[in-house]
Image: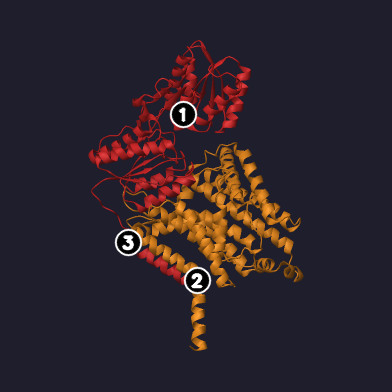
Amino acid sequence: MKKRYSAVLVILLILLTLAPVFGQTKKQLTFLFMPGVQDPFYTTMEKGVRAKCKELGVNLIVAEYPKAWGPEYQVPILQAYAQRGGFDGLLIAPTSVDALKAPLKAIYDKGVEIITVDTFLGDGDYSKPNTDYNFPLSYIGSDNELGGKMIAEHLAKLVGEKGKVFCEATNPDVSSVAGRVKGFTEGVAEFPNMKLVGVEWCLDVQQKAQEQTLAALQKDKDIVGIFGTNVFSAQGANQAVVNAGLVGAIKIASWDATITNIDNLKKGVVDLVLAQKPGEMGSLGVEWLYKYLTQKVQVPKKVIPGFEFFTKDNVNDPAMQQYIYQ
Amino acid sequence: MSTDTVNQKSSLQERLGRNWIGIFIFLLVLIFSLSARAFFSVDTAQLIFFNGTEVFLLGIAELFVIITGGIDLSVGFVMGFSTVVASKLIVMFAGLGLPPLASILAGSVATMVIGLLPGLVNGWLVAYLRVPAFIATFSMLGVTHGISELMTQGIPTKNLPSLAGMIGNGSFLYRAPNGALSFFARPQVARGQTVIAILPNMVVFAFFFILIFAFILGRMKFGRHLYAIGGNIDAAIRSGINVKRDLIKAYVISSLFASLAGISYVMKYITGKPDAGANMLLEAIAAVVIGGASMAGGSGTVGRTILGALVIAILETGLRIIGMQTFMTYILVGAILILAVIIDQIFPNRNR
């Protein structure tokens, strides 16, 4: 029986070796969109990508959404699509600043142009020479520090530019979150009558966010504002505020206009929501890839779309609905 | 109809039944190749083996224990534990001033040694304290998970030397368009030119160990003892086999292969995290069962387990290349698993 198996395997291998590698040569451009994880942020981005591709007459392949965040989920999907080939440009949200370098370089070496959206390789500065991650055309994503700073300014307005504020963050290891906290800290410092009394890290666990916020509220009973750097930290912070009987006295700001956060805003769980523009990131990515491939236009190494802010006053505004991730 | 033709016919059927997995792989390749031309290439074949490295290693890990009639539920989290240990050690060695290659080698070897511990405990619990394998290894799953979470504190390891990624994602041999061959390092060529890469390093790494242990299982006395223990443990004891010692060895080998899978993960993704192998248990057991081993013990071979793992690996990569959702993989692997058991019952003892 063993012989038989080896024979079958040998025949298979020979067939595979003899098979020519087909290269597709189409005139029309085709782009591949490789999202980071299955969530509303990236589905919103896909809508932007889709619309722009349609407008420019570009074929679009949307890769399977990874079911969890991490290179071990994203890389095999990316490699399978790369193997299938047939695309000239790649829009990708790398799920690791390190692990995606090698697989993306291999795709780049085949002649595919790459733009990273939302997240980046290395430190995100592709203009540096002599790095192993300067091959993508551009990084298109939010300036988290600026966003944190703008949250501080908007929150200051809500609390009358005075009093103590607290920051409930998720994970010190994630560059985007660290940037938000840094920006928020700097933003608060610009108001002489405001003080940041603490930053805690809940590692994306809502229960932990609640406990940490409660502890902060016991230490500083006169906190007037809290910035939760994502939906879990904001919800945890709110639960602590509710349990402490301080509803209304404390304003809570959150990041990302997910439906959950917007519903929370309508219910009064949070008071301020920052919306990134994933749709615009996708749309800009397609546009720059297209311009580079058709007209050889110089692409800026970094493109930063702005933010929108939701409050109770504008959350039902028809013009704002496009910024909700759905 | 003469008795002769009946015998011939049944033996043909039997042969088909015994070799269904080979036929099945052939059909899979055929279907995928017809669906997407790009599937049928050397690169795809290598990608399948590259992506399947962890399934191959964990399948072998599971095989050694399943042959003895046991089961090892801890392989996925022992793998995760090893990714954390290996990545932390490599970063530590590099921090002590060791050159990258030395750090990687030292970290990997140390991880293989540390990786024997969970198996040693599993084996001791099963062999000496008569704890059911299901419970012993299930507890080990929790323990290794907890320890790795403690070590990482929720933050995957980073700052590994970039050489690790070059090894993990590189190949043994490269052929430049002008015909020049080079080992390990990809030659510098103009962009868009095809460099043929042959044998991904991690596949070589995995099969180096798999072949050694295929020899041990298939050709050495210890291997025969394992089959004997799984076939009839009382008979094995009566015939003078040191069952306790051999059982411990089986669990240690299982743990070693889970660690090898962890090291492979670290090289590929240059990070380590507790849940790196969290959802690989099903695939590991499926590889062994599709490969024809009985969960009751006493049967199964390395070669067939590799074929079983190959079915899973071909499905995963193939479905993606033809553009189908890989959730289909779960359904198909489940269905093939049932099929394997049914075929086993129709044609028993196909592995002896």
Residue B305 picture quarter? bottom right
Residue drawn 44% across the image and 69% down it: A10
Instruction: Name the disc covering residue B19, or none.
Output: 2
Front position among marks 1 and 3:
1
Q: Type of residue at label 3?
A: Pro
Q: Quadrant of the C terminus of chain B?
A: bottom right
Does dot 2 land on a helix, a strand or a loop? loop
The location of residue A298, given as percent across then percent down, is 27, 34
Asked if residue A155 is positioned above or below residue B321 in the image, the reply reads: above
Instruction: Name the disc covering residue A263, or none.
Output: 1
Q: Type of residue at label 2?
A: Asn
The location of residue B265, given as percent across then percent down, is 53, 48
Quick one: which chain is orange? B
Give the left or right position of residue B229, taking residue B189 as reference: right
The one nearer the camera, A164 or A102, is A164
Front position among marks 1 and 2:
1
Asked if residue A21 is positioned above or below residue B224 in the image, the reply reads: above
**Circle 1 Cα neighbour tier, 10 Å, few/some/many (<14 / 14–19 / ≥20):** some
Residue that badge 3 annotates: A20
The one nearer the camera, B64 or B36, is B36
The location of residue B350, given as percent across then percent down, is 57, 72
Q: Are marks 1 and 2 in contact (CB under 8 Å)?
A: no
Give the left or right position of residue B53, taking residue A45 as reference: right
The location of residue A110, given as percent across then percent down, is 34, 49
Colour assigned to chain A in the rendering is red
Q: Are marks 1 and 3 in contact (CB under 8 Å)?
A: no
* CA–CA distance in space, label 1 to label 2: 58 Å
Does dot 1 land on a helix, a strand or a loop? helix
Asked if residue B15 is positioned above or below residue A318 in the image, the reply reads: below
**Circle 2 Cα neighbour tier, 10 Å, few/some/many (<14 / 14–19 / ≥20):** some
Query: What chain does mark 2 sit on?
Result: B
